Amino acid sequence: MTEGFTQRRQSFTPDPRPDWVRRLNAEGHCMDIRGLVPLEENSLIQTAMENTGLRDFGQEDWHERFQVMVRSLDTEAELTLLGRLMTRSDLLLFLEARLQIEDTYKRHPEIEDEEVRRPIHVIGQGRSGTSFLQNLLAEDPHNGSPRPWEIMRPCPPPERATYRTDPRIDALRARAELVNRVTPEVHVKHEMGVEIPEENHRLLCLAFGAAGWTSAFYGQTPSFAAHMQKQSMVPVYEYEKRVLKLLQWKNPRRHWVLKSPLNLLDLPAILQVYPDSALVWTHRDPVKALGSLVSTIGTLMWCRTDTPFIGDSLLSFTSADASAGMLCMPIAWLESGVIPRHQLYNMQYLDFVADPLASVLAMYDHFGIEATDEGRAGMQAYLDANPGSGRPRHIYTTQSASLDQERSAFSRYQSYFGVTNEP
Amino acid sequence: MSNDFAQRRGTFRPGERPEWVRRINEEGRCLNLRSVVPLDENSLLAAARSNTGLDDFGDDGWHERFQILARSLDEESELNLIGRLMTRGEILAFLEARLRIEDTYKRHPEIEDEQIARPIFIVGQGRSGTSLLQNVLGSDPNQGTPRKWEVMWPCPPPEKANYLDDPRIARMRDFANQFDRVAPELMSMHDFSCEAPTESHQVLSLAFGSSGWISSVYGQAPSFVEYMRTQSMVPIHEYEKRVLKLLQWKNPRERWVLKSALSMTDLLVIREVYPDVAFVWAHRDPVKALASMVNLVGTLHWSRSDHPFIDGFEALTSADVSAWLLCLPIDWLESGELPREQLYSLQFQDLVANPMATVEKIYDYFGFELGESSRQGMRKYLDENPRESKPRHSYPVFNGNLELERKAYARYQDYFNVPNEI
């Protein structure tokens, strides 16, 4: 099994870095970068409180997760100087968002009464069309997907009338696109912007509960991941719901579209927090998806460290065995009734890319979600404007010495959901 | 007078930044710099404590100075991303040096008994040959001059046996040369490398007490400069003495050669702390010296900020203030507060024309012994470092009102017979 991990991870070769990135990180080699850019609990909390003038971070459960995560980022993630700068900046955004969220709730307790009804949770292995599906669903004006800018600065809560022209969009654009300038190659692998629909695991970061997302984006955090394996994800998703209520308060939508491959691991917690969730799973030849993921995650790590794939917190996305284990977990939940079958809609990637709109409408029909004229028109307009969406532009290698081994690891998943091999 | 400031400052033209520096600072604009690279008191103190595992910073009144400096750097100095990184790094080094100095004293209280006898203090306007003089006098094996590496990282105290190949020298090299990588034009202006003799001001920075130097090198700190005008410099030079004792403990020298280019105002304080001090004043046409100084300070500012010469640098950029400073010691000489036998005056031209002859006169004046090994050491330095070997520092000499400046400097030039160069 270990062999399988190494092979996939070794297939990752980073692109050369832009000169300014290389030079800045080289300067970091002769400086005390831990001292220069503190990733230390007190300094972060103090700074966030000073920047906002607020002191209440909300219900206490976040704090231990935050402590473990920060210590792990500081001592284990092997961040470069630029990596530390970016990660400190990200952590401060989360902390400040929390402070402002609590403050907004205090001044507007009626936000508590908002209801998050029937969210559509897009799940599935990364690179299996989940982003395409989320982007498409987000074009139905009755749906909403959280955008990076409103996760970065959720307060004041976005308003419907100015949602597309909110000044935060321009103010945060350069910051949101920083990753693209540090690792320009990321662009073809995972689109990063200020307005494109974001994964819900970035929202979970406001509760400091997204170990997988953290390891891919902010720094590899093995001991945080180990800690989170023992923790309930329920309070983390409860906090996500709290944020969603605030985001929809002045900008209502019928359904949230929440997507992340990482949701696969948390389905029981998700169903506990969102009992009427509509789960949509895009299935794709897992061998194909896996090869691409290694390169995407490797690039995101390379953005902030010289040593991608230190720990094993993202094994489920880079090793066939661990990935197969993750893909099979829901089978047990389906069999045991933890996931009611009618709450899961299975969509084959190949069908979806062949006729995206028909696939979406079939899914709507399954869940009894109304397909309005505006919804169809919005999604059709998106498809017209983005021909070939979902067709991976990103070229990656699926050659693996142990292809047979991988096929056999995935066989239970593929046969249960009828997922065919791709050439 | 304010017109005059404008003229001098107006002569400064920044060099072109290396592309990577430009890019990094540009990226800094999308980050909350003050938050991402904090310069607030608590975060600095916490980082220094956690890096050393120590808690006692000593007590010479440093804390209030440090607080005001940190606030001033944080809020006023307009540091860019690379500037904040460099400055936070240096402030942390000072704090950590303090923690380690106190710890070393606690474990070796006998360091208190060290004597600092007859230090040579080289004074004068910046850019008037003071560095050359410090290098030459520091090459006398009986004398020692503090090197940047031992001031930044003084503990464990350097030892005589491996002073020249202490592992800290190699470890600090890249860090010390960062100045030159960020602003390559600095290479022709001043040697900031880790083995180079450093200013007394660098030692005073450990006491957070040298406002002119700090504001030139680490970040413009006008309200700190303002505050320091009201403070006694005595405890700050006392702390310097404390550092020197520690540095000579395992690496003894007959005399320290210290250089303090900015501190005309401090001569009496220095004498209070070092009663037998030997002052050596290098005189140079102040019009020329000031022009060179404006260019150096402007470049240092520019290496960390997009806004050089924010405020509070009258002494460095204005002829009137500069002339006033140069005349202060005249009054002290006349009143006897500064005994004539404790000050040797020399002319820049003579020093450059014949350094050894100048050195002989200094030794003779103060009754220092000039043995063969001392001569050899100094000659060796001069042979190995001919002036032509260094890149030429070119700067706009003057495009302001020369007549007005000459008038301002008349008393100084007349009293010390300082010839015009232009």
Image: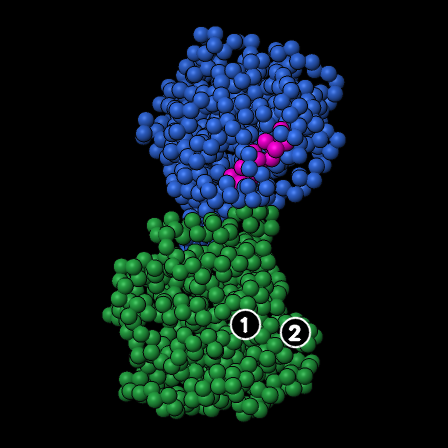
Chain colours: A green, B blue
Magenta segment: B91-105
Res. B413 visible in picture: yes
A344 relative to A165 in the view: left or right? right
**Among numbered discs 2 and 1, the one appearing first in the sequence:** 2
Instruction: List x then y, in percent, for residue A38.
Output: 51, 50
Residue found 39% across the figure and 24% down from its top? B230
Instruction: List x then y, in percent, for residue A132.
Output: 44, 80
Instruction: List x then y, in percent, for residue A276.
Output: 38, 81
- A311 or A223, which is in the foreground? A223
Chain designation of label 2: A
Point out which mark residue A105 bears.
none
Instruction: List x then y, in percent, for residue A193.
Output: 41, 68
Classify residue B115 by image quadrant.
top right
Q: Is residue A132 above or below residue A92?
A: below
- A318 or B261, which is in the foreground? A318
In this figure, which residue is indicated by the disc labeled 2? Answer: A5
Does residue B102 show up magenta in the picture? Answer: yes
In this figure, which residue is indicated by the disc labeled 1? Answer: A296
Mark whose residue sits in front, 2 or 1: 2
Q: Main secondary structure of the magenta part?
A: helix
Identify the amino acid type marked 1.
Thr
Residue found 43% across the figure and 70% down from its top? A237
- B408 or A141, which is in the foreground? A141
B41 relative to A35 in the view: left or right? left
